[in-house]
Image (tube, grey):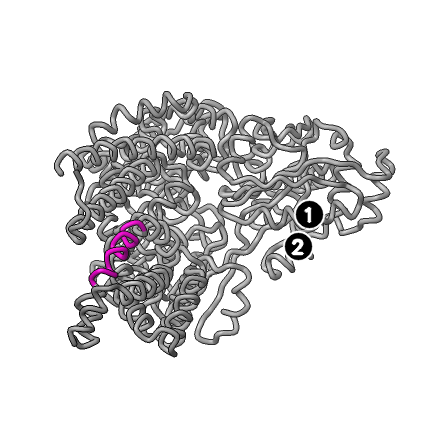
Amino acid sequence: MRAYIAGRLAAAVLVILGVSVVSFVLTFLTGDPAEIMLPPGATAAQIAKFRADWGFDDPVFVQYWRFLKRAVYGDFGNSLRHGQPSLPLIAARLPATFQLTVTAMLLAIALAVPLGVLAAMRRGGPMDLLAMAVALIGQSVPNFWLAIMMILLFAVSWGLLPTSGRGGIAHVVMPAAAIAINLMALLTRLVRSTMIEMLSEDYVRTARAKGLRELFVTSRHALPNALIPLVTVVGLQFGYILGGAVVIETIFTWPGVGLFTIQAILNRDYPVVQASVFILATAVVLINLAVDLLYVWLDPRIRVT
Amino acid sequence: MSSEIRRTLTRRDALRLLGVTTAAVGLNIGAPALAAPTGEVKIGLAAEPNTFDPHLTVGRNTQIFIANVYDGLTARDGQGNLVPALAESWKRSSPTTWQFALRRRVKFHNGDDFNAESVKFTLDRATNPETKATISSELSTISATEIVDPYTVNVVTKTPDFLLPVRLGELFGLMLSPKHTNAAGKEAIAIKPNGTGPFKLLSWAKNERLVLEANENYWRGAPSVKTLVVRPILEDAARIAALQAGEVDLIAPIPHVRIAELQRNDKLVVKTIAAPRIFHVTIDVRKPPFDNVKVRQALNYAVDVNVILKTLYFGHGTRLATVVDKGALGYDPSVQPYPYDPNKAKALLTEAGFPNGFETEFDSFTGSIADHSKPAEAIAGYLQKVGIKTKLNVFEFSAFGPRRVQNQTSPLFIYSIGDAYLEPSWVIRWLTQGGLGMHYKNPRLDEMLTRIEATDDPKKRAPQYSDVQKLIRDEAPFIFLYQADAAFGMSARVDYTPRPDETQWLYPLKLKG
């Protein structure tokens, strides 16, 4: 088991390194920050001088090597835009992003599980139709549109929730709901189909034959087994949720990693982009690893040798 | 100003003034604002500063904001005129030396004195290559700063620079305290500024909010509002929603498409300024057929700029006859823009030997501070109508930048330049620099500008710009377009008049009632 974890962590280092190379090269292919950083009146000669001073005119691999040499010591360099060390800048935004994404995930699970179970239990009935309609709408509604509509309704028209920003619990409701909706739809479908599968298994028939009540059969026997694939999907979706958070954080000016990163990308603030990629890639890799380990714990049939 | 007051002062007024002054001194205020700052105003802006280090600012959004915490040697008044600030007066003592007489008894927020040493320290820091100042290009003419006495400095330039007093204003001449800056270090200055300005930075959580507090000892007198809470609200719809929901009292900017709707809301006030951003299409005059002035004029006749303003900007813009903006020194409204006349355009093209038009390329871009791609599409459509087929290339802004640096732009490209100095010569010099895809040269124009630049008095400079505008219009090295309005939205609680140079100067902000 330990060897397995060590192997996965070693692979994670390679993954993070690979992601960092790709993001570094991609940001470079699309231009450099010289013109964005200088006032509009800068002449061609002044721009050239600025690029030379900052080393932006060096070949991309030279710049990457320069970056990597320091990054291994945890120094990602100072943000070009903020003039401060990049890694702490990004790290300071992690709590906001985790608050948002974890709330969104819990919200999605809390809605999807009962909805999916009910739909499976009353397959073909009105509850099933409702659940599937919710899932269809949830998967097809663009979350940025939903976000703006929620702002107009809940904040402007009814004055129930704050329009944007981060503060109390009220602030997290709309952005979390906007992120949760797609995941909720996906999970509802998943829970429904696995529950249907489980409810036709032999052990469920046996349980029913023993005379156990249907509620007990469903919740104690079928549901735990139906939730195993849910864990995998939620783990895999985490990366997508972080991606979705970029859009939603921007709409709500939620001060998280996504918003900060998108601004860094637009401004070609390499040190911050690199720090962010490093942190996000690490988070995704670790969460995937955690999911795999959880899987082993949840399902004793799976054992790593 | 003071002589005007003296001229019209009656005995009774003088006595009244004396009384007020005595009262002010007695109350130990000693400044124009007699009441202590009160209340709080919440503000939603599309962007927040990248730093409060005035030498490392990136982009207009920072430069137009941090002046609330600092002062320059000069400033602009509500009409955009250059006025004294930390310097009480200035004069050119030799072609390459500007002498500034500094204001006395000005203190930084932490209590440090402002004096000649502060000016020397600040300018030395800005021009020191080790600072890697992003604004160094705007101060590149400075060669040395000399202390004459504790309240007089000489700024020596490499070549004569008539714009130096403007440069050393709120844009690029914000003054730092030597003691504090040295003690705090570079990274701390970015988030813990210590200026002489009307507001102190109380706290700043990036992407969340920054809180400014009135500097009660401000040399112009304490601001009226005690606390300003500034929230970056990036998304236009969310920013407007925050104003509508009463979460904030002042927002900027408002997209043009939403202005009319907000104007209809009687709980809100919308005020616009003609932002000094000059939209134009650069024509590569070196490349045939654009070396022919008739072709360039034809391009100008071919485009109906008024319709573009009406449809894309909902009428919130100003048609420009040249590349001189309405608020700039010496803007001459009698220089008329090219009228929309496609027949005249075709006739000129025929005269130039292109009765059937020609094909060319036209660059535009997305992702910059303003929309350039939609106007470019409209312009390409108009050109097509007179037979000029354009291949329209749309780039991402940061990818377009390197193309300009390497002079790889197409014969036509749309661009806009913010006339931060409100000075036509600065804009025109930049637009005719012979780089970044801009290659128009004209010895006569050069001579006119040189003469203007040797004139220190703005009042004498202004009329000389008329001939410049006529020459540029006739020579048509650009398709002349427009400047768009910038809109500010506010609740009925606040009283605020935005400044025409775009600076988000919050000192005059007041709470009503």
Residue type pointed to by label 2: Ile
Magenta span: A224-236
Residue reaching furthest left?
Answer: A2
Q: Position of residue B248 (x, y in %)?
A: 35, 65
Q: Is residue B10 visible?
A: no
**In this rendering, would B236 be left or right of B289?**
left
Question: Residue most toward the bottom?
Answer: A126
Residue B268 in sight from this viewpoint: yes
A5 in the magenta segment: no
The residue that appears at 59% across and 41% down in the rendered structure is B394
Residue A228 is a magenta residue:
yes
The percent coordinates of residue B502 (x first, y second) are: 47, 51
Above or below — where is B325 with respect to A19?
below
Find disc 1 in the rendering and name its residue: B379
Q: Is residue B69 above or below residue B257?
A: above
Query: How would you classify the magenta stretch by its main secondary structure?
Result: helix
Rendering coords of residue B435 (x, y %): 58, 27
B145 and B267: which is toward the camera: B267
Give the residue drawn at x 66%, y 30%. B440
Residue tagged 2: B308
Disc 2 to disc 1: CB gap under 8 Å: yes
Left or right? Give the position of B85 relative to B35. Answer: right
Which quarter of the image is occupied by the C terminus of chain A?
Answer: top left
**Numbered disc 2: what chain?**
B
